């Protein structure tokens, strides 16, 4: 089981037994993030300016063979704790704090075939709306 976390620039890496960073658009990148890129194997990395994270989705589809896979953005992680605690920085224990680990996710996947984020409406000043 892997949730690939898409990065396109230097940012604190968040990893766990589930979270795995991937450099999207690596074929065009001027900076090496020193993580796996979407430019290996069967890929469409060069098309990243047009497809964004879909280049990672394509790479996962063509090159990763696990039966449980997910995709996240480097600033938008799943929060399996299901609360709205605001954090200012990703810290080393973030993955465990937010439940981004097999211990939390595997039981959920026994109940559900797919896990999606809950829709939230954010105002212009970045606050959650009721």
Image (spheres, helix red, strand yellow):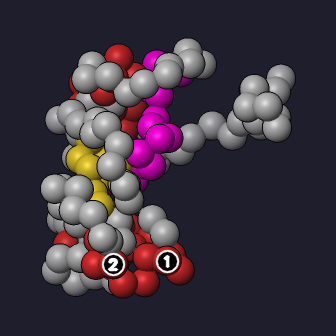
Could you tell whether 112 is left or right of 40 in the image? right
Kindly indicate whether the residue at mark 1 contacts the one at mark 2 (C-beta within 8 angstroms): yes
Q: Dot 1, crowdedness within 10 Å: few (<14), some or many (≥20)? A: few
Please state the horizontal and vertical placement of residue 9, each as a whole percent of the image: 37, 55
Main secondary structure along the magenta-highlighted residues = loop
Q: Kindly identify the residue that appears in the image at 41 percent across and 45 percent down.
A: 74
Dividing the picture into quadrants, the one containing residue 92 is top left
Residue sitting nearer the eye, 75 or 77? 75
Q: What element carries label 2?
A: helix
Instruction: Note whether residue 59 is visible.
Output: no
Q: Kindly identify the residue that appears in the image at 21 percent across and 33 percent down.
A: 16
Q: What stretch is highlighted in magenta?
A: 66-83
Q: What element carries label 1?
A: helix
Give the residue number, with chain letter if any, for mark 1: 49
Residue sitting nearer the eye, 95 or 29? 29
Please state the horizontal and vertical placement of residue 12, each as a whole percent of the image: 31, 37
Q: Kindly identify the residue that appears in the image at 82 percent across and 27 percent down.
A: 129
Measured Cα–Cα span from mark 2 to mark 1: 9 Å
Asked if 55 appears above or below 126 in the picture, the reply is: below
The numbered mark, 2 or 1, whose residue comes first in the sequence reads 2
- Magenta highlight on residue 34: no
Q: Dot 2, crowdedness within 10 Å: few (<14), some or many (≥20)? A: few
Give the residue number, with chain letter if any, for mark 2: 28
Please state the horizontal and vertical placement of residue 54, each as a whole percent of the image: 45, 70
Quadrant (top left/top right/bottom left/bottom right) for the C terminus: top right
Could you tell whether 107 is left or right of 40 in the image? right
Asked if 43 appears above or below 77 in the picture, the reply is: below
Dividing the picture into quadrants, the one containing residue 14 is top left
- Magenta highlight on residue 78: yes
């Amino acid at each position: 089981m892997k949730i690939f976390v898409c990065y396109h620039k230097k940012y604190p890496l968040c990893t766990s037994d589930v979270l795995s960073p991937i450099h999207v658009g690596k074929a065009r990148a001027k900076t090496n993030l020193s993580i796996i890129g979407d430019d290996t194997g069967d890929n469409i990395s060069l098309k990243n300016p047009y497809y964004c994270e879909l280049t990672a989705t394509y790479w996962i589809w063509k090159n990763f063979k696990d039966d449980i896979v997910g995709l996240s953005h480097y600033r938008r992680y799943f929060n399996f704790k299901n609360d709205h605690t605001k954090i200012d920085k990703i810290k080393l224990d973030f993955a465990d704090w937010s439940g981004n680990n097999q211990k939390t996710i595997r039981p959920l996947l026994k109940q559900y075939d797919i896990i999606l984020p809950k829709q939230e409406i954010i105002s212009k000043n970045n606050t959650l709306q009721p």
